[in-house]
Amino acid sequence: MDRNKNSYIFIYSIILVVVVAGALSLVAVLLQPKQAKNYEIEQKRNILSALKINVETKEVESTYAKIVTEIAVDESGNEVEKDDALVLYKAQTDKGLKYVFPLSGKGLWGPIWGYLSLDEDLNTVYGAYFDHKSETSGLGAEIATEHFQSQFSGKKIFNADNQFVSVKTNKRGAQNENEVDAVSGATITSTSVSEMIESCLNKYLPYIEKSRR
Amino acid sequence: MEKNRKERIFLDPLIRNNPITVQILGICSALAVTVKLQSAVVMALSLTFVVALSNVIVSLLRKTIPNRIRIIVQLVVVAFLVIVVDQFLKAYVFDISKQLSVFVGLIITNCIVMGRLEAFAMSNSPRRSFIDGLANGLGYGFILIVVAFFRELLGSGTIWNYQVVPQAFYDAGYMNNGLMIMPPMALIAVGLIVWIQRARQQKKEEGK
């Protein structure tokens, strides 16, 4: 058989690709449940991280089940049963009742996401967790560090006049209790974090205002 | 004579013709994943698996592969194995796969893999190709583990995530060397190993 004939090359590559694609699909389908489970644990670990609880991978699920309850609210701030409504998490920690809000937004190179936990007054930030898909290491990627995230503790999402202002990153450094230091050299990622927190909390604002009273 | 050759296929890549220290291949990932011993070991095993198996597959196919698309065929085989490894890591050692992030995917571009396929598997039997792939993977892994051992010990004071530098040292003013965690120190560590090995080898050859 002439291995340099075009027909041979075409048939050879078609068979090769079909066989490889078939094998890969099989592997992907077989491992899918196990991977989905890992992502779920990872998400729970992140929620716990926003509550400043860091546990071993083995203990994530039991700790989560013990203290966190998921609730859903609609756009006017009422608690509902529906699945497609806005989801937030109530957690009974040893430091009291906390609320955890999921965040997601756009960074410089790809998606960024995280969780923000508020104290029972729904104003003071208790903890924050951020992560990113592909921000620049050493610059934008700093939002995923303890150093950046710990700044959020104790900040307020309402200003002195009781207006919702969210927590913003400021390049000149935190000027008041509604601001944290931005990451130097990562203006776009820092601004994205501000926008993400503001736009995501905004959706929950009716619920937050209702529950504060 | 025949037995001698087989032994050399296995032993050469471990030290005398080590892919990292002698051929200077696969340096990029060697620098990136050697901060912790655990990720270095997983990376070493993944690469060994990919080189050994892709060597076998390509060697089995070697008489059917059309010469004009042989690099493409090799790439498809390597990419296939790398995706399989990546999926398994995500399913069974999720934490480590997060640390290794893109570097598992980048095994595809690791020069060691393509180098062995072209230089060895295309012209040798599956069994020999397997031994060759295994040995090259282990030679790569050996250097990774040595570098990671020192980087983790000096950079974090731990080995395999267990604290080995006693608290008393820290109380007495000892500090972890932050530089060891940075990529430049990996380059220096690899450089030192290359230096030591070449100096010794030269002496041996001169002594002959």
Image (cartoon, rainbow, N blue to C red):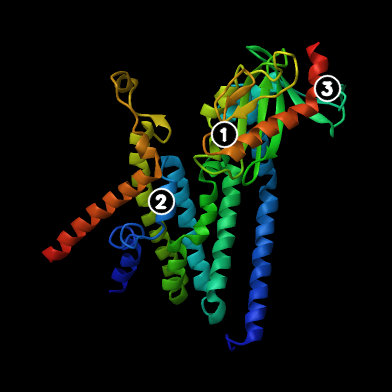
Look at mark 1 in the image and give the residue it sits on.
A143
Disc 1 to disc 2, how far (Cα)?
A: 26 Å
Under circle 2, the secondary element is helix
* Label total for image: 3
**Quarter location, residue A112:** top right
Chain to which the residue tagged by mark 1 belongs = A
Q: Can residue A167 be seen in this view?
A: yes
In the rendered image of this protein, does residue B45 appear above or below residue B96?
below
Q: Position of residue B9 (x, y in %)?
A: 35, 66
Residue found 55% across the figure and 81% down from its top: B68
The lab-note entry on whether marks 1 and 2 share a chain reads no
Direction from residue A200 to residue B47 in the image, left or right: left
Q: Is residue A37 visible?
A: no
| Residue count near mark 2 (Cα–Cα under 10 Å), binned few <14, some 14–19, many ≥20 | many
Chain to which the residue tagged by mark 2 belongs = B
Q: Position of residue B207 (x, y in %)?
A: 11, 63
Which amino acid does the dot numbered 3 rest on? Pro
Residue B30, which numbered label? Answer: 2
Look at mark 3 in the image and give the residue it sits on.
A206
Circle nearer the viewer, 1 or 2: 1
